[in-house]
Image (cartoon, coloured by chain):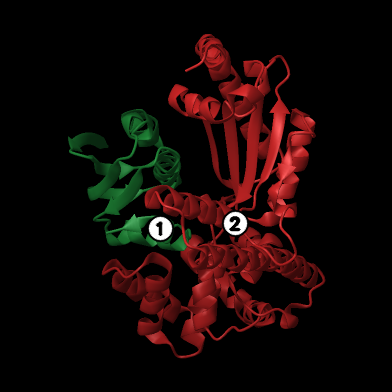
Amino acid sequence: MDLHTEMLLEEYREAIPVFERMQEEVLATLRDALQRNGLIVTAIESRIKTEESLAGKLALKGGKYASLNDITDILGARIVTFYTDDVDRIAAMAEQLFEIDWENSVDKRMLHELDSFGYNSLHYICKMPGYDYRFELQLRTTLQHAWASINHDIGYKSGVEIPREYMRRINRMAGLLEMADDEFSRIRTEITDYRRRVQHLVQNGKLDDVQLDGDTFNSYLQVRPFDSLNKRIAAINQAEIQEVPLIRYLRVFKALGCNTLGDIERLKKQYQEDAYRLARHQLGNTDLDIISSAVGAQNICIVCILATGGGKLGLVRLFDALNGHNTQNEAIAEMTYEQAKNLQL
Amino acid sequence: MKTEIVKNGDQLIAKFAGRLDTPAAVQTTEDVKPLLEAQNKEIILDCTELEYISSSGLRIFLSIRKEAAAHGSKVIVRNINDDIRQVFMMTGFISLFEIQ
């Protein structure tokens, strides 16, 4: 080991506490910014280069570095995203958070020729305010990360030069994953557009145009379709309404033959008066002054099942769908059936 | 109204006996406080000897469920009689709790 390398390693040992502080601050800054921007990522990682690894680097190209300040990857941070679009969004975010050393930063995604594929990541060399040393920030998607990890593993384990044929196959996989990344991004964009369209249709009451599924039912629930029935039921005993999730009713409405949100609206209109009568019959001679926001939907389903000849078995199936299969559901169905019989639903 | 809390491994079993009505709710709220702080437990609300539950009692059960969810615990309501089952049913809370 020459004197210059020894001097750089000594400087490195003394600077370790500084890099550790910088590492903590960089991670905290990134996490905070991601949260503020509503960006969900697969992983945020970081590492400080080990002395062994630095010595290896210096052995190869030590003469290139006059001081530790010239080595830009002693602290490395990496953000792994779900989507390619997010790499660009986080890059823009990093440009606001850190001073970017543009001369040494590189977008590996842009380095490939039109007919070549391989390592794809965005590498920014950054400076954290208050620190003299720079650090490297790598941004890549989960699929790019998977390719880079496997590529590294294969290269590392083999210990010999990989024949051209295998290299071609590995790089071909990078092309395949690039296509998959683009497709995932497109799918996300299209789903976001679809949700916006559904919300627009729901808000404009064009519910027959909206097929019933998890997404559309959630949008429908956001316009609080059972509120007016719940409020009428609450008024029976001046009860407070406790909000509970209604997503389990998706399965029930589907089982009742609803294919569109318009079908649910028709079902609601047809049965809400009887649903209210059932609630009045049940709650009217009690002093219960708390109800759940599920009570309206629950009673609509009960009266629909009974009106269409579903009987006790239909009610058992309803409670199985809502509560999971449970022997208690038979007792609940039996009790509900007897009460509803008095009302001649 | 009596409330007894028994630990059984990762389970906390609250045994209720009597009528959980408005006058009893104040003491019961105090009695169930250990349940509200339980982390990653299975909380069993054993209603074998519970004769009646009012709105105040329901509110206690709801607060136990809310705190349990926040602390990674799970709530199971066990052995309710027909009257209490009816209360859960007509208020629409029957599908909020796991009832055994």
Please, which residue is most extreme toward the front here? A2
> Residue A134 placed where, x, y %?
67, 23
Q: Color used for chain A? A: red
The image quadrant that residue B80 belongs to is bottom left
Q: Give the label on residue A109, or none.
A: none
Real-space Cα separation, disc 1 to disc 2, in angstroms: 15 Å
> Label 1's element?
helix
> Which residue appears at 73% of the width and 37% of the height?
A105
Q: Chain of mark 1?
A: B
> Residue A98 placed where, x, y %?
74, 28
> Residue A207 placed where, x, y %?
73, 78
The nearer-to-camera label among 1 and 2 is 1
Q: Give the label on residue A234, or none.
A: 2
> Which residue appears at 60% of the width and 79% of the height?
A271
> Label 2's element?
helix
Please, which residue is most extreme toward the bottom here? A309
Question: In this view of the protein, which residue sits in the foreground, A16 or A330?
Answer: A16
Q: Residues within 10 Å of mark 1 (few under 14, many from 20)?
A: many
Q: Chain of mark 2?
A: A
> Residue A343 placed where, x, y %?
48, 79
Q: Report the side of A160 relative to A170 (left or right).
A: left
Q: Taking A339 as reference, is A236 above or below it?
A: above
Q: Give the label on residue B88, or none.
A: 1
Q: Color used for chain B? A: green
Q: Report the side of A101 relative to A345 (left or right).
A: right
Q: Report the side of A162 relative to A7 (left or right).
A: left
Q: Report the side of B84 relative to A244 (left or right).
A: left
What's the amino acid at mark 1? Answer: Phe
